Image (cartoon, rainbow, N blue to C red):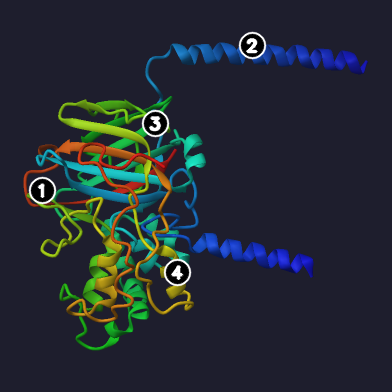
Amino acid sequence: MKKQKIYLGISTLVVAVFTFIAADHIDAPAVQGGTSDITDYYAFQGEDTNNIVFVANVQGLLSPSATSTATFDENVLVEFNIDTNGDAVEDLVIQATPRDGKMYFFGPVAPASPGLSSTIQTSATTNSVDITTYGSSPQIESNGGMSFFAGPRDDPFFMDFAQYSDIIAGNATSFNNPGADTFAGTNVMSIVVEVPKTMIGTSGDINTWVESKRK
Amino acid sequence: MKTLKYSIAIFFLSLIVISCNDSDDDMMMSAEPDFSGVYQQEDQMGRPAVNTVFVSSTSKDMFNRTTPSTQGSTFQSMFEANLTALSPAYANPGDQNALGLDAAAFSGVLATDVLTVSLDGTTTFYDGTNVLTGRALADDVITVELLLIFGGEDFTENPTLSDDHVDTNDKAFLTSFPYLASPW
């Protein structure tokens, strides 16, 4: 009987973990909770309106204590993809990968080939920034009109994900007012790049998405 | 006899340790980090919550490993089925959301999971005027998506499902780079 109870407890926990997914946090079995798990992606006009800012967040739902020991994975490449002609194939990439306390950035540059496999474009414009450690002020590197940051930040995502899950599971029929932000008090590992618009197009629209790739 | 064996083992072990140290030193000497090798895709994302909401659980890894240019043809019908299951009004002939998209058209837009960004001005998921011209940190993207899923032609349908009533982040964003708030 006791064993059964334990099994039931574990299976409830597993269900809870498996359904605790949101913007892209823990979205799929192969990546959830790992160092390549993308939680969110943002692209917006910068404070300098001649620039576009790209934000890729990985490793979601970090408590403050987990954040103090969280690191970027040196075997993971985070790739910002930019499609300039509307065919959803990347024409330019900005590649980011950490080595020995620094985040290295390559591009914007045409990829060796588009798609699911990447090599790092080491001949492209290369920049690096010291990865900001937990509790210290942000380390920012600016060069050639571009700015770079990598390190822990507050998770900018907000949603009453718990209530959404209850609605989907049939345990509730409506949202609460006010709702409760399931992501309050949690952190992510963040990579922020700001680039002049002239490096990624002229006018009109671009399409963009972010990928994580492992060596 | 046993002691001798251990001594020999320790002797060889120490040789290995010493040679490892040597190669470590060599690594320290080299100026450039190693960026060689091929990196294979594990996760991807364009718009928020797309894989989470519209992809069936057994296909989530596959969705992450399908290039955006082929996601539409591969996943549109799954998106339409899941959208209609979530919001049954979409099954009614002629039913549309506030963008004027019916189930087939809306799922077609969603299945190609890229974020469209304007280089000409305001960048927002939706601000009452501009639609899908980017994604800013403060955009209430979940309420926008709930409105497009449940809110019907004029955002008035299913009011208890079309807003989660969490409208802002738990920390204020910065006006300057790196824009995101400091960690908790």
Q: Are marks 4 and 2 in contact (CB under 8 Å)?
A: no
Residue type highlighted by circle 4: Ser
**Whole-percent x, y for residue A53 in the image:** 21, 42
| Image quarter (top left, top right, bottom left or bottom right) of the C terminus of chain B | top left
Q: Nearer the viewer, mark 1 or mark 2?
A: 1
Query: Do discs 3 and 1 belong to a common subunit?
Result: no
| Type of amino acid at the residue the image marks with label 3 | Pro
Q: Which residue is mark 3?
A: A98
Q: CA distance from mark 4 to mark 2?
A: 56 Å
Indicate which disc, 4 or 3, sits on the residue closer to the N terminus.
Answer: 3
Which disc, if any, is residue B18?
Answer: 2
CB within 8 Å, label 4 to label 3: no
- For label 4, the SS is helix
In which quarter of the view is residue B115 placed? bottom left
Identify residue type, mark 2. Ile
| Foreground tag (4 vs 3) | 4
SS under mark 1? loop
The residue under label 4 is A165
Residue B145 visible in the displayed image: yes
